[in-house]
Amino acid sequence: MKQLQVEDITVDVVRKNIKNVYLRVYPPAGGVRVSVPSRMSLDAIRMFVVSKLDWIRRQQVKLKGRKKEQPREFVNRESHYFNGRPYLLKVIERNAAARVVLNDSEMELYVRPDTDTLQKKAVLDEWYRQRLKETVPPLIGKWEKKMGVRVREFGIKRMKTRWGTCNRQAKRIWLNLELAKRRPECLEYVVVHEMAHLLERNHGDRFKALMTGFMPEWRLYKDELTRFSPV
């Protein structure tokens, strides 16, 4: 991978067997990467990046303003989110299988005595994963009918820079585990966004028109997620 210096911005240049140029600004620090056709000259790449400098700087400012969760210790009275709502954690130790129970204001985490922080995190992450596995299939079914597309498979994983991805060839979408913490409307937006890529690969005017047709308020949810880091 080559690097290109444009004013004060270092750009990672990735050459691929593609026809178009793709520019991304990555969280958390606002790193810049441009994917370009294999034979595109460095001068042409530089000119492209220069033309996008204002956009790059705006994205970097947005990333700096993102809310990033502080590392959790998984102790009593610590705040944890589910479906956009905060819950106070209540750790209950007992010699039984680990589980998570929600009530009106508390998230009860049942673990064995001497369970360490990483194990507590793993229990809660698995609970989040199971909640998404219950919630996502009905959403996919709903939007398959509306959009006229077919999702063969979906998966859930942690992603450092994205809320979701789509593999058009395999008709598979991936969703970020952190979406379990955000509002249900934000989860649905990401599902629709990734499914829209089955109709349009890029994020150009056609993609935006598709999103507006399917979900007119999609920009509100996109802006809401932009305020948070995906990790």
Image (cartoon, grey):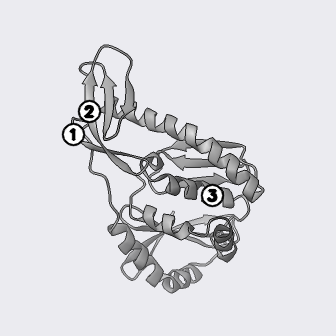
Q: Are marks 2 and 3 in contact (CB under 8 Å)?
A: no
158 or 144, which is in the foreground?
Answer: 144
104 shown above or below 186: above
Structural distance between the alpha carbons of marks 2 and 1: 6 Å
Q: If you read the primary sequence from the N terminus, does the residue marked by circle 2 or circle 3 appear first?
A: 2
Residue 192's disc number: 3
Kindly identify which residue carries mark 1.
77
Q: If you read the primary sequence from the N terminus, does the residue marked by circle 1 or circle 3 appear first?
A: 1
Task: Name the spot of residue 80 as percent of width and height, x first.
Answer: 32, 44
Q: If you read the primary sequence from the N terminus, does the residue marked by circle 2 or circle 1 appear first?
A: 1
Q: Are marks 2 and 1 in contact (CB under 8 Å)?
A: yes
Structural distance between the alpha carbons of marks 1 and 3: 35 Å
Residue 196's disc number: none
Kindly identify which residue carries mark 2.
90
186 or 117, which is in the foreground?
Answer: 186
Q: Which residue type does callout 2 highlight?
A: Lys
